[in-house]
Image (cartoon, helix red, strand yellow):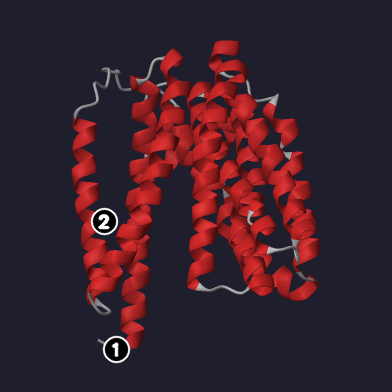
Amino acid sequence: MSPQILIYAVFFLMFIFSLSGTFAGVSYTDILGKSLAVQQRSQFFVNRQIFTSVAFLVSAPISRWVLGCSTYPYNYAWMFGLAAGLLFVASFGFWAIDEPDVMPAKDAHSFFQVLREVPKHLRENPPLLHYILLVNLTGFGLTSMPFYVAYASHHYGLTGEQIGNYLIVQVSGMILSSFIWGKLVKKFGFRGVVRGCIFCGTLLPLLLLSLSGTPLPIFLSVFFLMGVTISARRIAFEGLLIEISTNTNRALYQGVIGTTSLTVALFPLLAGGLILWIGYTPVFLIVSLLVASAWFTVSRIVSNSDL
């Protein structure tokens, strides 16, 4: 197979993977919203984040062992095979979920009718519009995280040992902060944790710039805060979406949000060009300001229980 055909094949497989992930994500959120009682949601998302972080920490040495057992490309074939097998096993968990019966809407529309009515949904549902603004504004911080790693590489190098240190510190931040977010979500709800995520996401690029040039053990606190921010986002954002939607419109909301999350798709390309043009510091300061502006959208996202 020629290299060009191989590249096209990889892009095609990535497209299939992303497409299937989108369908699975919409269904997953819809099932959670239908199956979890209101009083169970906060604890579920906290526990899920803790288990996910621990699994990520455990999988790192296993992945390294699998990749080292054989040469390329067989080592990656084993990795992808292992991933496919684990996904297959995990799919059986959905069969065990007691999903309540929900009558389908009698006025179901075609795909193109749904697309035409998206602006109408945004006008008639201000919480959805403000949630989309929240996702996009905080998305600037989320998509900037790979550039934080590049910035660290520029100042400290990027050896295999350092990459391992970055990941361990980041996952430690994800695990430890999950317990704190668990306390906060019980007291302030998902919106309180979202505000915590915004605060950490605003502080993160400022801390990165202020600690550059310090000894590496001190600079690693940036990656700890990165893990804290990721943990808050994974706990609160999906839970908040479930709160502002109903069983009849949740899948549509998820699709609209995914379609309008433009920062996740476009900002990495834009940020790379801006960094080459004006440097890291101005870009990171702009990111901090954009993430901070998301604070004003949270109070306008009203859940169904508040109505």
Q: Residue 246: x, y in percent?
A: 45, 21
Name the kind of residue labelled 2 in the image: Ala
Q: Residue at x 24, y 25 (%)?
A: 97
Residue appearing at x 44%, y 29% in the figure: 45
Q: Nearer the viewer, residue 22 or 148?
A: 148
Within 10 angstroms of label 2, few (less than 14), some, or many (20 or more) residues?
few
As drawn, 9 above or below 297:
below
Which mark is on residue 83? 2
Residue 279: percent from left, percent from top? 77, 70
Which residue is disc 1 drawn over? Answer: 2
In this orientation, does residue 307 appear? no
| Quarter in which the C terminus is drawn | top right
Q: Mark 1 touching mark 2, by CB under 8 A?
A: no
x then y, percent, for residue 34: 36, 21
Q: Residue at x 36, y 45 (%)?
A: 55
16 or 201, which is in the foreground? 201
Compute the Cα span from label 1 to label 2: 26 Å
Q: For this rendering, which residue is in front, 239 or 112?
A: 239
Amino acid type at mark 1:
Ser
Q: Residue at x 37, y 30 (%)?
A: 30
If the image is split into quadrants, where does the N terminus sit?
A: bottom left
- Say above or below: 149 vs 120: below
Q: Locate residue 180, reporting x and y percent.
A: 57, 29
Labelled disc at residue 287: none
Q: Circle 2 sits in a helix, a strand or a loop, which is it?
A: helix
Is 145 left, or right, of 58 in this rendering?
A: right
Q: Is residue 69 left or right of residue 234?
A: left
Q: Which mark is in front, 1 or 2? A: 2
| Secondary structure at numbered mark 1 | loop
**On screen, residue 237 above or below 263:** above
Looking at the image, is mark 1 or mark 2 earlier in the sequence? 1
